[in-house]
Amino acid sequence: MRTKTLKKNKVNVVTLGCSKNIVDSEVLMTQLKANKFDVTHEASDDTAQIVIINTCGFIENAKQESIDTILRYSEAKEKGLVDKVFVTGCLSQRYKPELEKEIPNVDAYFGTRELPRLLKTLGADYKHELVGERLITTPSHYAYLKVSEGCNRPCSFCAIPLMRGKHVSKSIEDLVKEAKGLAKNGTKEIMLIAQDLSSYGIDLYEKRNLPELLKHLSDVEGIDWIRLHYAFPAQFPIEALDVMNERSNICKYIDIPLQHISDNVLKLMRRGHTKRRTIELLDQFREKVPGLAIRTTMLVGHPGETEKDFEELKEFIQQAKLDRIGVFTYSHEENTHAHTLVDDVPAEVKQERANELMAIQQDISYELNQKKIGKILKVLFDRKEGEYFIGRSEFDSPEVDNEVLVDAKSEYVRVGDFANVLIEEADFYDLKGRIV
């Protein structure tokens, strides 16, 4: 029995997982709004008639969060709090038959490339003229720009090709048009995202065309910062670093997931590069772009990772002194190559190794931050929280990296604006300063 009155034609989109899912939700919301739906993103109440859950299926924790969210809205439907529940995204792409069997109360499940079918089910038309337009869910001054979809790499542990398909690049023309649209609406920073940024353009232009894309995007008026995310270390187009040096609005920042350093584990992971090549690549980065902030992720506990391999990884992290590191524990994913191997590292050992790496990186982060004291950094302010205005320098991406705090009692800056900040204090992850 219905217990409350729902707003007809109101849709609540719930996004789980990575920034690539955020972009997909923004595209979906734009299409729905053009079809006269009242659209909200992650509404705190259950007043929507329809809920669409954009799921993640990358690793076990993400899958569980997606399942818990589906169950939460399935129960809300049973109680009459919502009329319809639809599920899309990576988990739905990968496990649709199992989900239909286990949670039949959901009205329909859709894969990652079934937006037109989802819209048709809702009685909406897919409007081709809206391609490239998005209803931004991030603060308006920054946005993610997805330059390609899918991945052709054969990494043993990764299920992304199963969920996202083969690598498909967007054209430079379409991306420039999208960037101009974002800039027109007040976006000052764009973050280029892809499953494999290094392969951008290879399918369209028969070459890795990231350098050319950067040149065109950096010419877009109103875009002050361009940030590079998720570049693959093997076959990275080094010329992109020359463009970074030439163009002042390309941040001296790169997110390049290395995953490991031991040749034994890199081979087991089928990463296509070696320890020697990785170190050479990092040296090239630092030589070509002095002051470049390098962010990476490491994966511990892959089948076959020995204590010796882990010690080698620890030593590398201590010596490389990378600016930012995220650490994941290996998740044994069905239908991946690594699933054919024995998951021989106990869960508690995986977690211990992850904690050990993060402790090492915490000390490195503190050491690097101390060197910023007395320097003036250009900061883009994201929000006001408590007694502080909180922003980021060009060396930091939203949500995952360090932040710069300015006392709101004695200083004032508008959210979404840039300001120069003199750094006066530093701890493990955050900097404090005053506007100059």
Image (cartoon, rainbow, N blue to C red):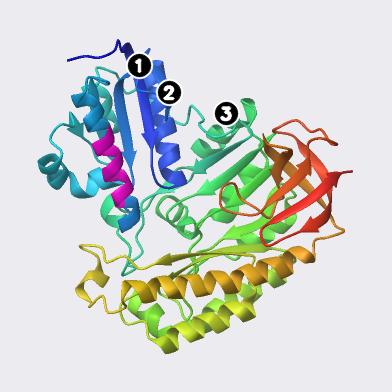
Residue 281 at what x, y percent from top left? 58, 74
Do the numbered discs 1 and 3 sit on residues whose CB atoms are within 8 Å? Answer: no
Q: Alpha carbon of mark 2 to alpha carbon of mark 1: how far? A: 8 Å
In what quadrant of the picture does the C terminus appear?
Answer: top right
- Left or right: residue 190 versus residue 17 is right
Please name the residue shown 52% across and 39% down the image.
Answer: 175
Q: Secondary structure at mark 2?
A: strand
On whether residue 69 falls in the magenta region, the answer is yes
The correct choice, above or below, for 364 with respect to 292 in the image is below
User: Front-most of 178 and 433?
Assistant: 433
Q: Earlier in the sequence, mark 1 or mark 3?
A: 1
Residue 375's tag is none
Residue under label 1: 10
The correct choice, above or below, for 286 with respect to 414 in the image is below
Do the numbered discs 2 and 1 sit on residues whose CB atoms are within 8 Å? Answer: yes
Image quarter of residue 345 = bottom left
Please tell me how crowded label 1 is: few (under 14), some (14-19), or many (20+) other residues with Cα within 10 Å: some
Q: Alpha carbon of mark 2 to alpha carbon of mark 3: how far? A: 21 Å
Please name the residue shown 36% across and 81% down the image.
Answer: 305
Residue under label 3: 181
Residue 276 at what x, y percent from top left? 53, 84
State the predominant SS element of the stretch in magenta. helix
